[in-house]
Image: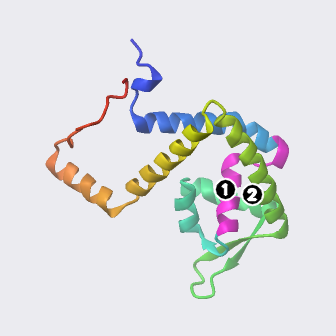
């Protein structure tokens, strides 16, 4: 018998939700902007951090290096970004948005906002705020040194941490 969605593990549910939302919205981004969501993600990161290097961009975008490279080449061909050799290290290059890239980023921001509002429509405003706060707290925790230490201890001990005061996923 198949488990219901609410009985699946949290990381699986988050991944599934993100992938379904991306898949559902990707066609809208392509028809309105001529870009896929992952291309918009890369463009946004470059715009927020002018001069970002490839390795950092790939990490922040959570994309494989080969996919990031293909996206960069496509954005350059479209005239949305430009690359410059790093003055301090000729082996690296830095990425910047062009004026057209900034216009596209602004248009994407509006489209993203509208689609995110639609995604969150089943939640009341207060629920959406709590959901956002909880996601931010989990993101901070997962990125923390404390979490990394706990994972190292968990891996070394091979004993699962206690689940005190935690309801099961089905409750």
Does residue 123 sit above or below 38 in this rendering? above
Q: Is residue 5 visible?
A: yes
Q: Residues within 10 Å of mark 1 (few under 14, many from 20)?
A: few
Label 1, secondary structure: give it. Answer: helix
* Residue annotated with mark 1: 70
Q: Whole-percent x and y of residue 147?
A: 31, 56
Q: Mark 1 to mark 2: distance in Å?
A: 6 Å
Q: Is residue 79 visible?
A: no
Magenta region: which residues?
31-48
Q: Whole-percent x and y of residue 47?
A: 70, 67
Image disc number at residue 74: 2
Q: Main secondary structure of the magenta part?
A: helix
Image disc number at residue 46: none
Residue at image x 68%, y 42%? 116
| Mark 1 vs 2: CB contact within 8 A | yes
Task: Identify the image quadrant of the C terminus.
Answer: top left
């Amino acid at each position: 018998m198949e488990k219901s969605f609410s009985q699946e593990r949290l990381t699986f549910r988050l991944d599934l939700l993100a992938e379904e939302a991306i898949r559902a919205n990707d066609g809208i981004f392509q028809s309105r902007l001529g870009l896929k969501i992952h291309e918009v993600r890369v463009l946004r990161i470059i715009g927020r951090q002018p001069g970002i290097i490839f390795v950092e961009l790939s990490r922040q975008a959570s994309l494989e290096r080969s996919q990031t490279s293909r996206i960069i080449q496509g954005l350059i061909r479209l005239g949305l970004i430009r690359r410059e050799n790093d003055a301090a290290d000729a082996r690296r290059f830095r990425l910047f948005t062009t004026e057209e890239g900034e216009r596209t980023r602004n248009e994407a921001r509006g489209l993203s906002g509208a689609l995110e509002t639609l995604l969150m429509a089943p939640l009341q405003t207060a629920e959406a705020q709590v959901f956002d706060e909880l996601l931010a707290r989990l993101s901070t925790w997962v990125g923390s040194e404390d979490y990394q230490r706990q994972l190292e201890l968990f891996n070394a001990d091979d004993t699962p941490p206690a689940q005190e005061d935690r309801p099961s996923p089905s409750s």
